[in-house]
Amino acid sequence: MQRLITGFLLGLVFGAHTSALSAQSEPEQLTLTEFLGYVKAFHPFVKQANIALDESEAKLMKARGSFDPKFGLDFSEKAFKNSTYYDRLNATFEVPTYYGLTLKGGYVEADGNYLNPENEVSGEGLYSLGGELNLAKGLLANPRMTTLKQAKIFTQQAEEENLLSVNEILFEATQAYLEWYRAYQEYQVFDQFVENARFRFKGVKEQYAVGDLAAIDTTEARIAFNARVLSLEKARLKLREKSLKAANYLWINDTPVTLSPEVQPALDTEAFEMRFSAVYFSIEEHPKLRALGYKVDSQRLERRLQRSNLLPEVTLGYQWLSETDVTENIRLGLDPENSTTKLKVGVPLFLRKERAELEISSLKLKDVSLERDQVFIELSNKINALQSGVSSFKRQSELAEMMVSDYRALFEGEQQKFAAGESSLFLVNTRESKLIEGLLKAIELSVAQKAAHAELYFNTSFAR
């Protein structure tokens, strides 16, 4: 691939900025492997698929932020007419945990002539250490826990969807390359038979000049020659069109690349089959099913959260209080006689909102599960159909090659009879037309077989 970068793309396939470098004496070839290498490395859609993966990782970081420790400081002071009404300092430190427990620590200083008795602190300050625990709602399932789990699942889901997106782009690029290759092969066929028709037209004219053939034979030869030239022009236009479509997938960094007319597709059947060789594949491992499986898991977490919301809100808070720093002497600081305790209970009477949310999450879970089952059947049938298609197209391609061989034998035999004066130019042209039809059909079936082979590969092979 490095050779192609330095010798081909930088010299032949750039657009208007490097058009002067496009005219080379020998045509440059671009293999399918090299073509797909550039698509995978530089195509914007591939980069977009990777952006979606980066976005999922950013969302995971955001979800983890719900468990970040939090420090708070609240200071307030009031002085009026040379009198200090109050002077309060409240520093807090909270550590959310995975389950419904929040660890809390704090330090409070308070002084003043008009201080609220509830806020009075003996000594220089008061330390506290404790926490709050959800005993019912929020204990085993709470929003921050569910969000974090769903973010992890979403990252895994994004990885599977990224595989799907990249493979889809590579398959579309492969199709475009094969269509370009088919157009090139058809152009080669017409180019060859234009030369045959030109040579035959020249020979008929020479024979007419010496009186061996009638004037009508030159007319027929000219018609055949012009028909081949017309077909060649159509094939040239089609080739340029397909090469431009293939070039849609070629980028270098952020710069689109144009294929010059001198660049030719190079496709070896044996190398193609090795590149897209089938591997053992289990339907359950398909990224689309795995992505839906992660979606099911995420929806189950949502339903679990909504079930938890049916429970009453019961919050128990407890803190040890100490005039000394508890971190210096835990045994003296954690005195159960010096503490605060609080209990908070609350529950909606009808739970209509909570029951509705649970029903919605259950329906979404059922919907995703049914979608996964349907996709499983569709993928199974699709892969079976592709496998059958590959075998069928291979057989059709072999039959077409046999027909081409027979058409060629008939054409060459008719040419020999015409040279011996035992046939007519009309029969030669007819045999030649049948040979061209056979060649075009053989090319069509060969490309169709390769396209089916590639589609099967991209539906069963994923680089994890």
Image: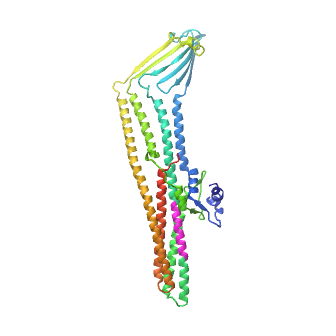
Q: Name the dominant secondary structure of the magenta segment.
A: helix
Question: Which corner quadrant holds the N terminus?
Answer: bottom right
| For residue 26, side relative to residue 380 (left or right) | right
**Residue at the image point whose x is 51% and y is 69% from the top:** 234
* Residue placed most toward the observer, 369 or 410: 410
| For residue 103, side relative to residue 303 (left or right) | right
Give yes or no for residue 184 being in the magenta stretch: yes
Above or below for 149 versus 389: above
Q: Which residue occupies the extreme bottom position in the image?
A: 211
Res. 277 in view: yes
* Residue placed most toward the observer, 279 or 312: 279
Above or below for 82 versus 63: above
| Quarter occupied by residue 259 | bottom right
Residue 93 x/y as whole percent: 55, 21
| Quarter occupied by residue 199 | bottom right
**Residue at the image point whose x is 51% and y is 25% from the top:** 96
Residue 85 x/y as whole percent: 56, 11
Res. 87 in view: no
Give yes or no for residue 343 being in the magenta stretch: no
Above or below for 78 versus 232: above
**Residue at the image point whose x is 53% and y is 38% from the top:** 57
Residue 298 x/y as whole percent: 44, 37
Above or below for 341 versus 2: above
Q: Which residues are magenta?
A: 178-195
Residue 435 x/y as whole percent: 47, 73
